[in-house]
Amino acid sequence: MQVHADEGGVTQTRGGIYWIILPAGYLGSSFWGMVFILSSTNLLTTRIAAGCFILALLVVLFVAKNWLLRGLCIGFIIFLAIVWLLQETTKVHALRYIILFIGVMNSLFSVYDIYDDLISRRVHSSDAEKFAEICPCPCNGVGWGVIWGMISFIFLCGSIYLGLVILS
């Protein structure tokens, strides 16, 4: 896995189910954004989400192939650890809002990234174009971009709605 400074990246796989792998980058980000939004509604689930996020960042830190991704992981780990420490030792209770912010930004960026990469820019090597090549239905890459964008937007709206229902 690599992350590049131009907001791009690449993940190499061996085998697997391409029907799941190709949309996973876009829809996975939206799904995890939904999980973080919903987990920010309760202090216990906020702590669990923060712990899982730190654990995932530690795993990526040791798997990463470039220093930009390692630096991002280290920065987020330090930031979350400081906020969590402040949460537990002072009257500053910001962890829930940080997790909510990360969730909302993940979801919003997923919707934006799908639009930018798959709908407005026609790149033949995009994940949606590759998905259209293996899919027997008549959708092209832009069509799959629109479908994935709608799914991502539904995740965002659904998590906001459910979060408000849980908080009320």
Image (cartoon, grey):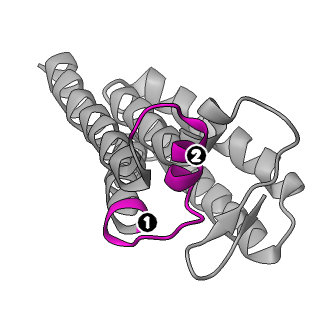
Residue 92: in sight, yes or no? no
Residue occupying the point 42% across, 41% down: 30
Tell me residue 108's x, y (percent): 31, 54
Question: Which residue in the structure is indicated by mark 2?
Answer: 133
Residue occupying the point 41% across, 49% down: 140
The residue stretch that appears in magenta: 117-138
Question: Which residue in the structure is indicated by mark 1?
Answer: 117
Question: Do residues under tags 2 and 1 come within 8 Å of each other at their CB atoms?
Answer: no
Tell me residue 2's x, y (percent): 76, 65
Amino acid carrying mark 2 in the image: Glu
Residue occupying the point 58% across, 46% down: 133
Residue occupying the point 72% across, 29% down: 17
Residue 135 shown in magenta: yes
| Mark 2 crowdedness (10 Å alpha carbons): few <14, some 14-19, many ≥20 | some
Residue 85 shown in magenta: no
Tell me residue 10's x, y (percent): 72, 62
Q: In this view of the protein, which residue sits in the foreground, 123 or 94?
A: 123
Tell me residue 137's x, y (percent): 44, 32
Q: Which mark is residue 12?
A: none
Q: Is residue 143 left or right of residue 123?
A: left
- Measure how far apart labels 2 and 1 are at the Cα level: 17 Å
Foreground disc of the pair 2, 1: 2
Amino acid carrying mark 1 in the image: Asp
Q: Is residue 137 left or right of residue 49?
A: left
Q: In this view of the protein, which residue sits in the foreground, 95 or 105?
A: 105
